[in-house]
Amino acid sequence: MPVRAPRLDDRTFPDLVAELIARIPGHTPEYTNPVPGDPGHTLIELFAWLGDTLLYRVNLIPERQRLEFLRRVGLGLRGAQPATGLVALRLRDLDAPGALVEVARLRPWCAVKGPVPFETAQVVSVLPVSGLVMHKRALSEVEAAAVAPILSELEELYELGAGSARPYAPTPTFPADRAVPAGFDVVSQTVDGRLWVALLAARADQVDAARDALGGAATGVPATLDVGVVPAETFAEAASGEEDLTLGAGEAARPIEVAWELTTGGAASDGVPEWVALDVLADGTRGLTRQGVVTLQLPPPAQIGRPQNDVAVTVDAGVGPRPPRLDEPGLEGRVVAWLRLRPTQELDRLALSWLGINAVPVDQRRTLANVGLGVSTGEPDQVFPLPLGGVDAATFELGVEEEGSGLVPWTAVPHLALAGRDGRVFELDPEEGTIRFGDGVRGRIPQAGRRIQALRLRAGGGPAGNLPPSSLTAITPALAADGSPLARPVEVVQPVPTFGGTEAERLEEAERRIPDVLRHRDRAVTADDLVAVAAATPGVRLGRVEVLKGFKPHQRRQDVPGVVSVMVLPRIDGWMPPAPRPKRHTLEAVHAWVSARVPLTTEVYVIGCEYVPVGVSVAYELREGFERDATTQAVRTAVRTMLWPLPPGGPFDGGAGWPRGRAVRSKELEVAVARVAGVDEVHAVQLATRSADGRWAPVAVGADGSAQITLGPWQLPEVLQLAVVADTEPDDLVDDDGGAGDVAVPVVPELC
């Protein structure tokens, strides 16, 4: 029997009116005409309305009990998650006459101007230089053919061995600080496997002043260089040539070993520039595996300089290990030094979407300081509301006034039950936006009449913070590390979108978590536990979660003891390609959440799925009386819906998406097409797959007259080519998805 929450009283307003009228003969038989509009009937309706409002409040008692139950089991509502991102900063007006060339060190939590409030998340040094990222691009076939006649002469000019010259073209990697969403592969798209960053002064006559500022000539303390790095979100190719399923765990998350080196201005006897290795003070990228900032310690001014790399001065400019040539007029003269990113391990691929200097992380919050919350009454268990919900608990600071000491910082604790009698502690509810003090036994009671003040309160979040590039434009106001305003404005360059903002959890969603939490107690032991725990990951929206027992994704091995892979797909709307693929931050968030809740002996991986390209062509007979274009579109939708990986797609009504590992059969697609209104007869459905060289080939039809594409347990189909025709001659057939693949379309010849 299903368990349903009962209503304590299910009578409605009409029921109460009817009940009161039915009681009239027993109490006042002389009242014989209780019709609407009569004063007596009006009184009856008035009392029925009052009773209805009371019943409404009575029926809220179960909801209050559920809320209290949520609090007792520690399942408070989850707050809105703030969006995060990465921006680069620039000092304005550096090229103005008489501009002061110095390093500006900005404090954290500076407001960033944009559609919604954002703030810088850490201290950042804004250097008086800009960064031009360059690489040595291999020539195309046409370019190489044009250079081939003089290649031997170049080898003779530079005294190189025969056949050793590799011509290249100096090319900006991220022009105008624009990101490359598909990623730039440092390994395969360069001739030397390196990235070069020219640190440019605003004007040529500011080079010496910029060098002194970077090296800390005035203060004796060299500046730090904040380099922002955004790895590409594309899936890497495994050694077997297959798609790498894992980004949140295992080999794909291993840090990449690189060296950051700066030119000193000196050179060896053969003219090769000297380099100094920079110490990494902080690495928010975890070895270039995630978006973040790498903070580098710069050397003193004597070890900062540019090599002689002007082709007008030295013919060897840009040759060999020298930085790439800068042939744009006036550019070479503005170079203060060159920064080089050099991998120190063998790599098959190092794809970056963006790299730039003067970078800082930002998040979707705003900061309030010294906010008065009220005055203590001296009673136990006092609760004070905060002016904002969605509070960042990590940075929240509270002060309580004490006699003779002024405002004294108190400490937040998870539970007041663990606090001692004299502990200066409080309990914070970040989502509700309240603080609770103790009762004198579990935590100290603030003295009566003393002020309660939030020294620092950061709050914010929500999907409105997921902004496209170039949405954030300026720091307003720009505050130095000591809190004083900067004299020069600071511009913001946002090369990549912000992401991760989610709305706060609703009460209904929290209530749905109660059975799962009571079942698995926040521990993932069984497959059902893993699904429930992964689906409840804060800050991500998942559309599908499945568990592959014993599957190790990198080797595509199955039945490996102690290994489990959790396949997750993000929630998206519609049926059009591309199919849903989890991004790096989603997989990392789910992996961090799940791995903390599995047994110690379990090796857990969080993966996407491997999509198998599928081409489908359909020919059908249009039923009389139906419109051709509408029916053809309905057939397309039916095919895509059936092969879609998210609910309610799939081969079954109300399904959970196409089952992983289930073969794609043309006969099943024929059934889906035949069920479309307007289809009189399905002439044929043909399948096609894409080979390694990118060409499409039809799938052979078996003895039963059906074509089939076999999938592995970790694979799902992705419809990349779809052609649907009705009563069409062969010469009129086109790929109605606009693709260029060679997908064969079956037709039925006309009968005489």
Image (spheres, grey):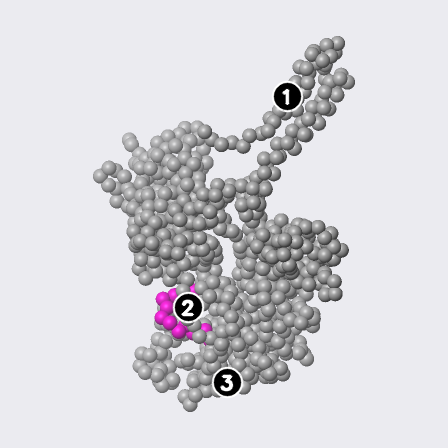
Using a 10 Å C-alpha cutoff, classify the residue at mark 1 as few (fewer than 14 neighbours), some (14 to 19) or many (20 or more): few
Q: Mark 1 belongs to which amino acid?
A: Asp
Q: Position of residue 556 (x, y in %)?
A: 31, 55
Q: What residue sits 22% from the left and 39% below the top?
A: 703
Q: In this view, does 23 lie to the left or right of 262?
A: right
Mark 1 or 2, nearer chain start: 1
Q: Read off the residue under disc 3.
A: 265
Q: Residue at x 42, y 49 (%)?
A: 524
Kind of residue at disc 2: Ile
Secondary structure under tag 1 reads helix
Residue 656 sits in quarter: top left
The residue that mark 1 highlights is 15
Amino acid tagged 3: Gly
Examine the rendered structure and indicate whether residue 512 appears above or below residue 27.
below
The part of the chain drawn in magenta is 340-353
Q: Mark 2 points at which residue?
A: 256
